[in-house]
Image (spheres, rainbow, N blue to C red):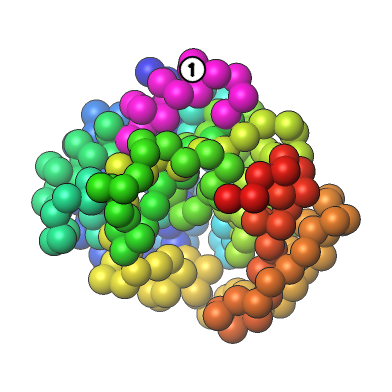
Amino acid sequence: MSVLIAVPSKGRAARIATRSMRYLPDTGLDVRVFVEPQDADAYRAVCDPQIIVTLDDNDRGLGYVKCAIKAYAIAHDYRYIVKHDDDLQAWSDGVSAQAENKRDSAQILRRAIDASVALMDSTARVDGVSFNYRAFMHVADKDEWSFGQRLQTVYIVRRDSFYADTRVSVFEDLHNTLMIWLSGKHTARYNFAGMYMSGTKFAGIGSGGLQSNVFDRAAMAQDELMLMQRVYPALKFKRSARHWGLEPDLKAARRDIFGMKR
């Protein structure tokens, strides 16, 4: 199975070993951590140096890192890319109310990746799979799969459907979802794996990454909304609790593109 687990990381060398890199090596899949030149030595000190991929530039944003990830995947002939955040605490199967240990997290994620690859290998219609947040998992009353769900935080896609644009960082997962839908392909969510987010429910809350003070996320978000609307003029927006106020309304886009209401 030719799968690359790509972990973009910035300014988090001091804690990555106690977060995602606590369990990712135990998945048995190829893991690479993509870091900026200014951080490379710090990451090599806490991670296996062989898995560190050093970017060409500093402070270019997540969209720039995604471009580097896709180039790396093409050069090394990976078929699938898992974009994985650097600060996840653990993975849950929805049974335990507590954070799983590193062995459990690795096994849960590996099962999720294997199931996702099997699904995409079995049908050309699905080009990407996302996962739930642990806080929203209700395994007892859910099927294994939900279709038409947006990609969020951690997701796996076919390499050619890993849409990378240096201008898109804040909404990179929503942008990737929209581009897959506009290509005529579908997305799914695997419901039996849920993410624990660094002691919080959601992504985009700790220091480092796009939260670094070199980025103006509000301004970036506004630019990205306009770019996405140029790609898809029918795109609508909805209110967001984040400080930039608006985000793409992908439920409306899904309804308009596919006629899916749920």
**Which of 170 and 209 lies nearest the eye of the viewer?**
170
- Residue 173 is left or right of residue 95, and the answer is right
- Residue 76 is left or right of residue 3, and the answer is right
* Residue 13 in sight: no
| Magenta stretch contains residue 120 | yes
Q: Which residue is mark 1?
A: 121
* Residue 9 in sight: yes
* Coordinates of residue 145 in the picture (x, y in percent): 42, 37
Q: Amino acid at mark 1?
A: Asp
Image quadrant where residue 107 sits: top left
- Residue 70 is left or right of residue 168, and the answer is left
**Which of 252 and 166 lies nearest the eye of the viewer?**
252
Q: Is residue 4 above or below residue 181?
A: above
| Number of marks drawn | 1
- Residue 197 is left or right of residue 203, and the answer is left
Q: Residue at x 36, y 39 (%)?
A: 143
Q: Within 10 Å of the Cα at label 1, are there few (<14), some (14-19), or many (20+) other Cα atoms?
A: few
Instruction: Give the residues drawn in magenta, as a range.
Output: 112-126
Q: Is residue 61 above or below residue 218?
A: above
| Magenta stretch contains residue 105 | no
